[in-house]
Image (cartoon, rainbow, N blue to C red):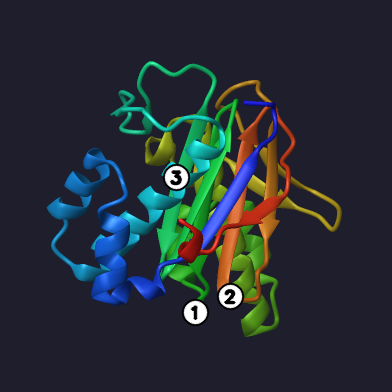
Amino acid sequence: MNGAIKVYTADVGALTDAQRFRQLYERVSAQRREKVDRLKQEKDKRLALGAGALLEAALAAEGLSDFTMTTEHNGKPRLAHVQNVHFNISHSGTKVMCAVSDSEIGCDVERIAACKMDIARRFFHAGEYAALLQCDDRERQNRLFFRYWTLKESFMKATGLGFQLPLDEFCIVLSESEISVRQSVDDRAYYFREFDLHDGFQYAVCSAEKPLGKLELLPLSSL
């Protein structure tokens, strides 16, 4: 890679059309088709297919068109026999998201819904829960909850620990000018970016050691 961090997102709503689904299914790798075939629910199949196609398009842009996926000991997927190319994918609702970098990367997308304060109380860091309690507007509270949720999950993925890292063992700190994290996982610097596409979803990316670049929208029709 040239050092840039690239983030892609697409909407898989069009894959409810059987012909569109089949066309994209036939274009992805055999490994991705096997993953899609293992799923029972049609919604899950569409998300898995869309996320896989988005990832393959992102990797093709880096000159990687022939690769094999494997998993690390913690279950995080990676490219076999490929050095210095890291990726992460996420999906929610009809949205799929992919981030590609030459350093560890994590991303998350979530549909914004009603704030789940019981989850925040039980699992979030005390500082994050206190900030949610201070919101005097329900809409702002909902948005803040999902900002924390996506930023936290993107950080957990970037560390390589995923949900092996308890949600309350680190704290996302939000200010008007930056996003940071108080953590004791390691001594690396972590950088965050959020994306508001005004589509009812919250997007976040976390990168280890590298500042983040721009979001690149890749319509599903171009995959």
Q: Locate the C terminus by quadrant.
A: bottom left
Q: Nearer the viewer, mark 2 or mark 3?
A: 3
Give the Cα distance between marks 2 and 1: 6 Å
Residue named by callout 1: 114
Q: Residues within 10 Å of mark 2 (few under 14, many from 20)?
A: some
Residue named by callout 2: 142
Residue 157's x, y, as percent? 48, 39
Q: Residues within 10 Å of mark 1 (few under 14, many from 20)?
A: few
Chain-order first, disc 2 or disc 1 = 1
Amino acid residing under circle 3: Leu
Q: Quadrant of residue 94?
A: bottom left
Q: SS at mark 1?
A: loop
Q: Going 63% across and 42% down the picture, which residue do you hit? A: 6
Contact (CB < 8 A) between labels 2 and 1?
yes
Residue named by callout 3: 55
Chain-order first, disc 3 or disc 1 = 3
